[in-house]
Amino acid sequence: MAELQSRTVKAGELLFAEGDEADCAYVIESGEIEVTMRIEGIMRCVAVLGAGELVGDMGLVDDEPRSASAIATADSRLTIISRADLASKLAVADPLLRLLLEVSVKRLRAKLESLRAATPIPINTAAAVEVARLEGELKAGINSGQMQLYVQPIVDMRSHQIIGFESLVRWMHPITGLVRPDFFIPLAERSGLIVPLGRWVLREACHAALRFDREQNHAKMAGKSGFISVNVSAGQFHDPEFIPELASILRETKLNPERLQLEITESILSDTSAAKRWIAGCKKLGVRIALDDFGTGYSSLSYLHEFDIDTLKIDQSFVRRILEDKRSEKIIITIIQLSQALGLEIVAEGIETQPMFDRLAALGCHYGQGYLIARPSPIDAYFAAR
């Protein structure tokens, strides 16, 4: 094996930055290294590593760089190990393997802990390696065509005609098959992969809207200029490149911006100033904004006063209880009446039975979606021969 290189770094020196493709690892011989990671748009210290611990891209685990930065906090002697030399060490079961896995656990534990938790969530080595492996596979899946666009129709409650779709994403893993979104979406959010994943969904959704308009389809949307709705995560909201990329995708696809609706949740609106700037930036491009899961937050009514919202989506927890719970029904009635007074459109989510649909329509709800109307399905299913 080639002789290992070593050097001394100064306090405050950046060793590697978030997203770097650094092809080496660093073993600290003295001093400390501070590891920071972007969490909800803010760089936070997640670990301080001491002598003998590893920083770097953790190539041994999943051959992908970690989304973190390392900064020397004291003079430190670092030994630089190339990935090829690292592989040869692992091949002969060098004790270094145990050291590397232990540090992988430390970094992954920091990723998985709650922002409000005083102590990290316990996690064992096997679980840490599995999380890292899945994160690497998800990144590969986003870049290699494993993601699939699914859509769920939204109908006019009066005419029963489809007027648009909500776009969803599914992961078709080449070995395990279809991966549930409630599994890989949280993984994407924790790892920061939600940003490239969200970008992929946004572009595909714009193309889907154009396809529904130009080609004959089972939804009977050809030539009707229906809209497409896309969910925006907190990670995308905090991404400074989101609005420029949104503008770029609209130019690229040539989709009329009025046919694109971005769905945000109430949690994003907690930072009033940032939310106003973000919404204004999207509206300047001509895009519509929908407030998803409306009614579940503590300040729902104040949001209608503060923010330029076009559509409210009534949370399905109220919709599903509308026939049995008078309080839920009264809440829905109030939301519909308020929205009508403010000139907002209303979408009821989670409609599962015909009586639910009929009652919501009678109350004046504009639009609805749910399993009664159609389950989410691959976009190609709407164009396949029957």
Image (spheres, rainbow, N blue to C red):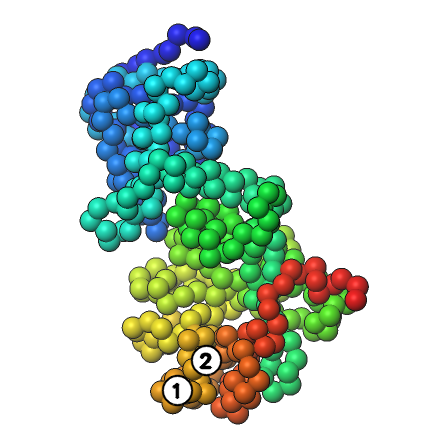
Look at the image and tell me in which quarter the C terminus lies: bottom right
- Mark 1: which amino acid? Asp
- Mark 2: which amino acid? Val
Give SS at disc 1.
loop
Using the rendered view, name the quadrant where residue 322 is placed: bottom left
Of labels 2 and 1, the one closer to you: 1
Q: Residues within 10 Å of mark 1 (few under 14, many from 20)?
A: few
Residue 86 % position (x, y): 43, 19
Relative side of 91 to 37, left or right: right
Q: Earlier in the sequence, mark 2 or mark 1?
A: 2
Q: Residues within 10 Å of mark 2 (few under 14, many from 20)?
A: many
Give SS at disc 2.
helix
Would you name the residue on which mark 2 appears?
Answer: 319
Would you name the residue on which mark 1 appears?
Answer: 325
Q: Is residue 319 above or below residue 134?
A: below
Seen from the viewer's position, the closer of residues 26 and 230 is: 26
Residue displayed at 32% across by 16% down: 79
Residue displayed at 45% across by 87% down: 323
